[in-house]
């Protein structure tokens, strides 16, 4: 896993994802020839749901399977696992720690780094 201060300039900035926006993605090149992807993802739990999957695609694909770091920055408490990670994208599996009586929204900051 990457260190937070190396991967995402400010996890708190990710919490300010504008209403109605489900993803914000930045992609660039590193000095060592690798690539980085910083993203903010929003997910919506329907009333009564406990689980949710968030997907982030890499197009074009990265040169290698990236190292990934993620952190919840808004919403009710969830457990997050990296469900799958490939050169073409990743899936995060989210599960509410407590049932919600109404719909709930979560925001997750993601940082991926692939070597050349």
Image: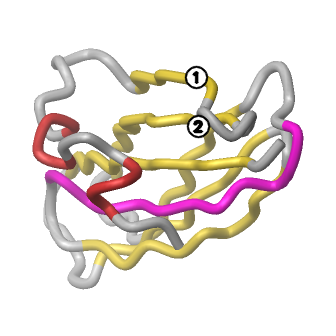
Residue 95 lies in the magenta-colored region: no
Front-most of residues 53 and 46? 53
Q: Position of residue 63 (x, y in %)?
A: 88, 39
Front-most of residues 57 and 5? 5
Q: Position of residue 2 (x, y in %)?
A: 48, 66
Q: Position of residue 30 (x, y in %)?
A: 60, 33
Q: Residue furthest bottom?
A: 97
Does residue 11 sit above or below 34 in this rendering? below
Side of 73 where 61 appears, left or right: right
Front-most of residues 13 and 92? 13
Give the quarter of the figure containing the C terminus: top right
What label sits on residue 77 in the rendered view?
A: none
Main SS of the magenta segment?
strand
Identify residue for label 1.
28
Binning the other alpha carbons within 10 Å of mark 1 as few (below 14), some (14 to 19) or many (20 upward) gives: few
Q: Quadrant of residue 88?
A: top right
Front-most of residues 7 and 91? 7
What span is in magenta?
63-74
Identify residue for label 2.
36
Does residue 68 sit above or below 8 in this rendering? below
Q: Position of residue 87 (x, y in %)?
A: 85, 45
Type of colouring: secondary structure
**Quick check: marks 1 and 2 in contact, CB under 8 Å?**
yes
Side of 85 where 61 appears, left or right: right
Q: Residue at x 44, y 72 (%)?
A: 80
Q: Label 1, label 2: how many angstroms apart (C-alpha)?
A: 5 Å
Does residue 16 sit above or below 111 in this rendering? above
Q: Quadrant of residue 10?
A: top left
Badge 2 element: strand
């Amino acid at each position: 896993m990457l260190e937070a201060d190396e991967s995402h300039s400010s996890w708190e900035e990710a919490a300010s994802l504008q209403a109605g926006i489900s993803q914000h993605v930045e992609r660039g090149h590193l000095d060592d020839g690798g690539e980085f992807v910083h993203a903010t993802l929003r997910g919506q739990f329907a009333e009564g749901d406990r689980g949710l999957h968030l997907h982030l695609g890499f197009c074009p694909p990265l040169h290698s399977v990236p190292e990934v770091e993620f952190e919840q920055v808004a919403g009710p408490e969830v457990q997050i696992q990296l469900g799958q990670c490939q050169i073409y994208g990743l899936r995060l599996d989210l599960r509410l720690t407590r049932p919600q009586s109404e719909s709930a929204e979560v925001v997750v900051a993601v940082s991926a780094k692939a070597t050349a």
